[in-house]
Image (cartoon, rainbow, N blue to C red):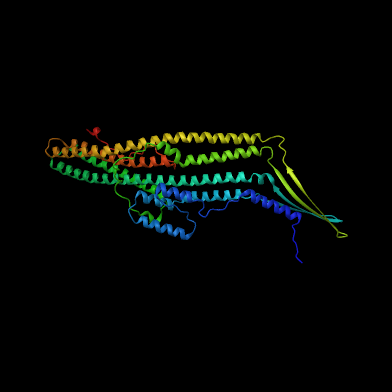
Amino acid sequence: MKSVHTLSPWRKQITCVVLTGLLLSGCKAFSPDGGMDLVASVASQDLQKDVAIIATADQAEQIQSRIDGLLRKPLTADSAVQIALLNNRGLQAAYNALGIAEAEMVSASLPPAPTVSLERLVSPFEREIEWRIIGNIVALVTLPARASIAADRFEQARLQAVEATLRLAAETRRNYYRVVAARQLAAYLDQSKGAAEAATKTARQLGETGAMNKIDQAREQVFYADVTAQLGLARQRMETERERLIRTMGLWGRNLSFILPGTLPALPRKPYAQPTIEMEAVARRVDIQSARIELAALAKTYGLTEASRFVNLLELSGIRKTKQSRSTGEKEISRGFEADLQIPIFDLGETRVRAAEQTYMQAVNRLAEKAVNARSEAREAYRRYRASYDIARHFRDEVVPLRKIISDETLLRYNAMLIDVFDVLIEARQRLAANGQAIEAQRDFWLASVDMHVAITGGGGAGGDAPQSMAAAPSGGSAGH
């Protein structure tokens, strides 16, 4: 004889609630890479670099091995960026925030958990037990909308992780060019100091023989002192910029002994042409894409608020009550349901709808502002890029060669006793300043190239701030005449 199992009405209610929730939810699952696919794709295409989340000791060991390999060679801008993307703990924290957003998205896609309550009352004559299972109907009906909003928030978190990656890459490149420029200027001032020291010794010897008067000796000495002071400031700045680069790369301990090149990269043969930079910026900038997703999520939130303005709380409870006589042992079972509805007497949802509407319009205006600013920043960044290229090339091709000719001719005239030592010192100061300005112009070009890339792709920290001058003509020029 085949037995037939049928569900009791109580179990049918529970099964119905659970199945309905699962059907409405379309539950999300955790991605295998923690949502890092977009970050890895942008890092590979725009930066030609790798990114990774360090979660285990083996992964940390592999990353450290790769960093050690990069640090064994003289550091380049690309290798510095790669080290920063793998080793900067602040970026790792941004990736952890992405994991938190994914967990919130998965949580939001799950149906609201039912509440089970048990009530037991005992009197001298009977014992009463009541079971309740309570489900939030409003939360269950609006589950697809809330899951869609959570998915948009997660997509926004992915773009924010991309933005953090681009920001760190840009800041690392800036710090790299600044420290190399400071190192190049310090090396040049060190050479100039050696020449000034030799000239000062010669002047002192000539003074001892009476061939040079005291004022000319003093001029030589003050020039040497000025160059020495400039060298000290340049070395201090070099150390400051080096520490900034170290912080962005996240290095410490034995990894601090990396090697930097002595000079900045040469200028490209010709600058890049960017006729469509405004359109590229509006289409590619991650902050604008993030604002668009924020707007879409707020639009859904606004619609959800309008739909649920009159019914904000509706709970349905399934009830099973058992009464048992303590004298006879007879049981009486009753079943039913209970609905709890919050009546919006004092607030028909107008306040929530107004707040959601204004929040949505706020996002609309901010998106429009971002688009306008992105166009302006792109134009500004490209103009600065072109101007800095022309200035750097002008110093390289015109100013520095002419200064060398003037210095050589001045020295020849001094050796032929056609001019005095003051003219030589003036020319030495001017040549020193010109070479320093040439290094700064070359540095500014590379900083402008980073800012132009940031203006197109996003990542914040775009230029506009004038780099601090590292070179200055030693004092005592005309004032000492």
Q: Is residue 99 above or below residue 471?
A: below
Rendering coords of residue 183 (x, y %):
31, 47
Which of 130 and 417 lies nearest the eye of the viewer? 130
Rendering coords of residue 367 (x, y %):
50, 36
Q: Is 161 displayed left or right of 195 in the figure?
A: right
Q: Is 420 displayed left or right of 13 in the figure?
A: left
Q: Is 52 displayed left or right of 414 in the figure?
A: right
User: How many numbered circles does the render carry?
Assistant: 0
Q: Is residue 453 above or below residue 68?
A: above
Rendering coords of residue 188 (x, y %):
26, 45
Q: Image quadrant for the N terminus?
A: bottom right
Q: Image quadrant for the C terminus?
A: top left
**In the current view of this chain or complex, which residue is farthest to the front?**
1
Which of 214 and 110 lies nearest the eye of the viewer? 110
Looking at the image, which residue is at 41% across and 41% down? 454
Rendering coords of residue 432 (x, y %):
25, 40
Which of 3 and 134 lies nearest the eye of the viewer? 3
**In the current view of this chain or complex, which residue is farthest to the left?**
416
The quarter holding residue 458 reads top left
Looking at the image, which residue is at 73% across and 55% down? 11
**Can the viewer see residue 480 in this picture?**
yes
**Can the viewer see residue 429 in this picture?**
no
**In the current view of this chain or complex, which residue is farthest to the bottom?**
1
